[in-house]
Image (cartoon, rainbow, N blue to C red):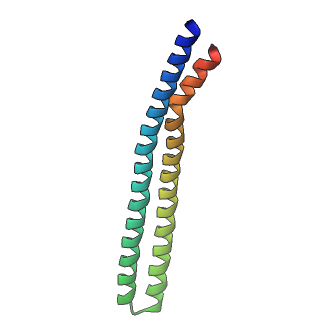
Amino acid sequence: MTDVLEIQQTTNDLGEAATSSAKTLATSIQTIATAHADYAKKAMQEGTEFFARLTSVKEPAKVMELQSEYAKNAYETFVAESKKISELYTDLFKQTTKPLEALIKTSKAA
C-alpha cells in the first residue's frame, strides 16, 4: 500500500512540476517574443530616420560620416539586444527546468 501512495505522490509531484514548467515556459516565450519585436521596431525606426537624414545630405563627406555613424550605432544596438535576448533564453531554460530539477533530486535521494 505504501508503494501505491508513493507512486501517487510522485505522479502528483510530476504533474505539478510539469504544470509549473509549462506556465514558466509560456511567460518566458512571451517575454522573448516581445524583446524580438521591440528590437525589430527599434531597428526599423532607426533605419527610417537614417534614410530620412541621408536624403537631406548634399556633401559626400557628410554622407560617409552619417553612414559610418549609423553602422556603428546599428552594430552596438545589435550586440546589446543580442546579449539581452540571449540572457532571456538562458533564463527560460533555467526557469523551465527548475521545477523538474527539484523533482529529479528528490527521486535520486529516494
Rendered residue at 64%/19% (across/down)? 108
The quarter of the image holding the C terminus is top right
Residue 24 x/y as whole percent: 44, 39
Q: How many marks?
A: 0
Task: Please tell me which residue lies in front, 48 or 15.
Answer: 15
Q: In the rendered view, would you say 22 is above or below 80? A: above
Residue 39 x/y as whole percent: 42, 62
Residue 33 x/y as whole percent: 42, 55
Q: Where on the picture, by quarter, is residue 107?
A: top right
Rendered residue at 55%/6% (across/down)? 1
Task: Please tell me which residue lies in front, 83 or 36.
Answer: 36
Residue 86 x/y as whole percent: 53, 51
Determine the residue located farthest toward the bottom in the rendered image. Answer: 58
Q: In the rendered view, would you say 42 is above or below 50? A: above
Rendered residue at 39%/82% (across/down)? 51
Q: In the rendered view, would you say 8 is above or below 96? A: above
